[in-house]
Image: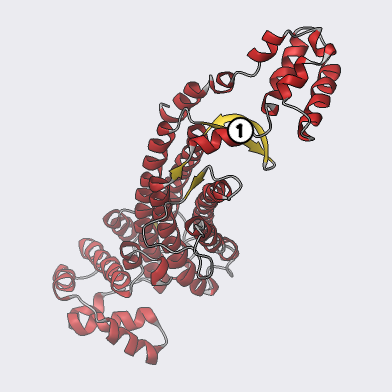
Amino acid sequence: MIPRYSRPEMTRIWEPENKFQIWFEIEAHACDAMAELGVIPKEAAKTIWEKGGFDVDRIDEIERETKHDVIAFLTSVAEHVGPEARFLHQGMTSSDVLDTCLAVQLAQASDILLADLDKVLDVLKRRAYEHKDTVCIGRSHGIHAEPTTFGLKLAGHYAEFARNRKRLEEARAEVATCAISGAVGTFANIDPRVEEYVAEKLGLTVEPVSTQVIPRDRHAAFFATLAVIASSVERLAVEIRHLQRTEVREAEEFFSEGQKGSSAMPHKRNPVLTENLTGLARVVRSAVVPAMENVALWHERDISHSSVERMIGPDATVTLDFALMRLAGLMDKLLVYPDAMMMNLERLQGLVHSQRVLLGLTQRGMSREDAYQAVQRNAMDVWKGNAAFLNLLKSDRKIGEYLSNDDLEELFDLGYHTKQVDTIFARVFEN
C-alpha cells in the first residue's frame, strides 16, 4: 500500500484511527447490551460512551511493553474513561474485537469498490452504445476471424463487470459477520444476545459458529472475488494494449499535452496505464493463496492468519480501488479509430467472409468436406498474396457450379455479421 497507487477514501479505512474507532464502538455497544441484560450498571455503559477515547501514540507505547494490541487499546481507553472501564471487554476475547472489526472494514471497503464498479459500468455502457455500429475485426488466437463491432466488444466487458458487481455484493454479505462469543466461541462468559445487539448496531450478521475466530473460508471467498475482478480489469487492459500496437492502432490511451512516452525516443506513445493495470491485477491476485491458506487454522484458533490479513486486507482493497478508478478514467478518454478498424478488417482482402461462403455452398448442395476444401484452397492463395478472395472465388469453376457472382457478392456483405447486435445489446443492457 503506497501513495502512488492509493486513494484517500480507501486508505482511511485501514488507518489506525478508523480501526481503533471501530474497536471502541464494538466494546461500547457490547457494554450497552450487557447493561440492558443487567450484567453491568447502565451508568457505566453511559460513561464509557461519554468519556471513551483513545490515543494512537499511547496505544503504540503501551503495546511496546505488553506486546498485545487489544490490551494496549483497552488500557488507553481506560485512561480516558476512569473506574467504569473495568466493565469493558466483559467475557470477550481479543478475536471478538479483531474479527468483528475486520468484518466492518471489509464491508466499508466493499462499499467503495461497489461504487467504483458502478463508475466502470457507466462508462462502458456509454462507450458501448457510442460504438455499437463501429465495425471492426474480431480475432481468435490473435488472427483475423470475422467482423464484429467495437461496441459489442465493450458490451461483453460490461456484462463481465456486471457479474463482478453481483459477486462482490455476495462476497460482502458473506464476510460481514460479527463474533462476540468469548474464548473458544462457547458464550460461556457472555450472553449471545450481546453478539446479536452488536451485530445489528454495526450492520453485520451473526456468525453462526465462531470457534473464537470467524471461519476464514469467508475471507478466502472475499479475496478470491477481488482477484476475479482484478482479472477482468486485466482482460480489458490487455485488449486495449493489443489494439494500441503500432501495427494495429485501432484504439489507444489518451495522450495528454506535455506527456512523454520515452526518455530516449520522443515519438513514443506507450500504453502505460493499461500496462500498469496488468501489474496491479497481479498484486490483487497475489492475496488469494495466502487467504486460502488462512482457512486451515489450528483447532479453535491460532494467529497465523493475523499477519497475513494485516497486509492483504489493505493491499488488495486499496490496489483494486485504484485500478478500477484508473480503468474508468482510461475508458472514458479512450481514443477510438474507426477508419483504422475498417482498414485492418480489409487487410486480408475478404478472407473474413470465408465461413459464409462455406455455408452458402453447403446450402446449395455441395458436401461440407468439398466446400471446406474449395474455400480453403482459394483462401490459401489470398494468404500468399495472389489475389483478392472474392475474385478468386468468382474464377473458381467448381464454386461457380453452386454460386453465381451475384451470390458471392451478397455473401461479402458486412451487415450480415452485425445484424444481431441490437439483440445482444438488449440482452446485456435491458435485462
Say if residue 285 shows up in the picture.
Answer: yes
**Looking at numbered disc 1 in the image, what kind of residue is underneath it?**
Leu
In the rendered image, residue 205, in percent from the top left (x then y), is placed at 37, 52
Q: Can you name the residue that lies furthest to the bottom here?
A: 65
Quadrant housing the C terminus: top left
In the rendered image, residue 198, in percent from the top left (x then y), is placed at 30, 59
Q: Is residue 245 above or below residue 275?
A: above
Q: Residue at x 81, y 30 (%)?
A: 381
430 or 216, nearer to the observer: 430
Q: Residue at x 20, y 77 (%)?
A: 53
The picture quadrant where one finds residue 406 is top right
Q: Can you name the residue that lies furthest to the front here?
A: 386
237 or 266, nearer to the observer: 266
Q: Is residue 327 above or below residue 104?
A: above
In the rendered image, residue 81, in percent from the top left (x then y), is placed at 18, 80
Q: Which residue is mark 1?
A: 345
Q: Is residue 228 above or below residue 404?
A: below
Say if residue 180 shows up in the picture.
Answer: no
Quadrant housing the N terminus: bottom left
In the rendered image, residue 356, in percent from the top left (x then y), is placed at 69, 19
Of helix, strand and loop, which one carries label 1? Answer: helix
Q: Give left or right: position of 119 versus 406.
A: left
Q: Residue at x 47, y 44 (%)?
A: 164
18 or 125, nearer to the observer: 125
Q: Residues within 10 Å of mark 1 (few under 14, many from 20)?
A: many
Which color scheme does this rendered protein use?
Answer: secondary structure
